[in-house]
Amino acid sequence: MCNWKKIIFQTGIIAGFGVFFSCGNSGEQQVNQQKKKSQKNALSIIRNDDCLNCHNIQDKTVGPPYNEIAKRYETNNENIKNLSDKIINGGGGIWGGAQMSKHPFLKSRDASKIVRWILSLDSEEVLKITQIPGLSIQDLKDKPIEKGISFRFYSPENHNFSSSLPEIAESVSPLDELFVPQIHFKGKSVFSPISESFYLIAKGKLKIEKVGKYFFKMEKSGKGELSINNRVVISDSEEDQEIVLDLTQGSHDFSLKYLSSKGEETLSLQWIVPGDEYYSVIPVEFFE
Ligand code: HEC
């Protein structure tokens, strides 16, 4: 587990004060703010409330992950009503020992907007967004690109998940290296002609234009770890698949380590940018 989630929690509180201090605005400004508020999508309401202290989309934390809630309940008016009431009133007893806190200030309209979004997470339309065809190393070798994310493949003996930085001794030469436009590999022979077992180090820079909270998700069949600005943000553990980070404008170093799973491989790096509601594969234009 990493401590970034705690930092976000603290900045959340500071942001809360920001809202408090801005109450003295002129009437016109208040109306504008209200308008903006009512246009907020479900995920921005969640981002601005305390939900992320206890819930992730994918990972189990204090509360159940939202995609598990989506799998449990059908989308119908009764479930939308009951779950909205539960968020407002709090409570427990369904998912295990923990209790959800009350959210008496959440409007019931916003609560049902949130519930609709949560329940949409396992719908076909939403799942389709990340079911775009994966890349293959052979295709990239046939049509090499000159910029993008640097992929270096090493023999698996060189892997080291215990150090936080994916550094490998200068003296170790990679089995192969190339640039890739996206991290989205899914299937049996997507990494051929690289040997069946390998250790991969991917490095690049992410260009961030919109300041705000970014969700990152790493889907992996083998062992894998993601670092942003030289900090491990997604560790190699089954429960740790996603992270929410406050990113500033500019360029951010990222690196990823992956140890092949031999056979069916999945390695996909996805995000939700501020303003969006669903995961998508990070597109090429965001990599320097
Ligand atoms: C203090 C931690 C905490 C916070 C904050 C929190 N939740 Fe929960 N949430 C939980 C726990 C624990 C459960 C499981 C409760 C149970 O087992 O019935 C849960 C359950 C849920 C459920 C499923 C309820 C059910 O009956 O199946 C939804 C939907 C939900 N939370 C949404 C939210 C939203 C939206 C927010 C923010 C407005 C939020 N939660 C804030 C801890 C929290």
Image (cartoon, rainbow, N blue to C red):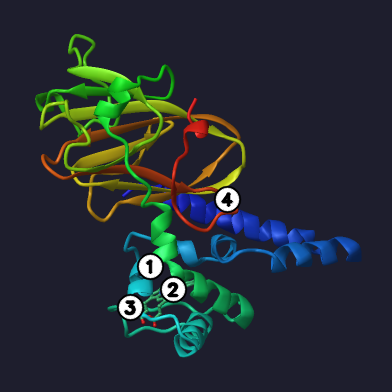
Q: Earlier in the sequence, mark 4 or mark 3?
A: 3
Mark 1 to mark 2 CA distance (whole Å)? 7 Å
Q: Amino acid at mark 2?
A: Leu
Lateral position of residue 122 relative to residue 221, left or right: right
Mark 3 sits on what residue?
72
CA distance for labels 3 and 2: 9 Å
**In terms of secondary structure, where does tag 2 sit?**
helix
x and y percent of residue 14 in the render?
Answer: 62, 54
- Judging by the rendered image, the residue that carries numbered circle 1 is 122
Give the amino acid type for the residue marked by disc 1 in the picture. Answer: Asp
| Label 4 vs 1, first from the N-terminus | 1
Q: If you read the primary sequence from the N terminus, does the residue marked by circle 3 or circle 2 appear first? A: 3
- The residue located at (42%, 84%) in the rendering is 91
Mark 2 = which residue?
A: 119
Lateral position of residue 68 relative to residue 9, left or right: left
Disc 4 residue type (three-letter) = Pro
| 8 over 286 or under it: above or below | below
Which dot, 4 or 1, sits closer to the camera? Answer: 1
Q: Amino acid at mark 3?
A: Arg
Which is more foreground, mark 4 or mark 2? 2
**Ligand 1 quadrant in view:** bottom left
Residue shown at 56%/54% (left/top)? 276
Dot 4 and dot 3 residues touching (CB under 8 Å): no
Q: Is mark 3 within 8 Å of ligand 1?
A: yes
153 and 144: which is toward the camera: 144
Q: Residues within 10 Å of mark 1 (few under 14, many from 20)?
A: some
Name the residue beneath numbered marker 4: 274
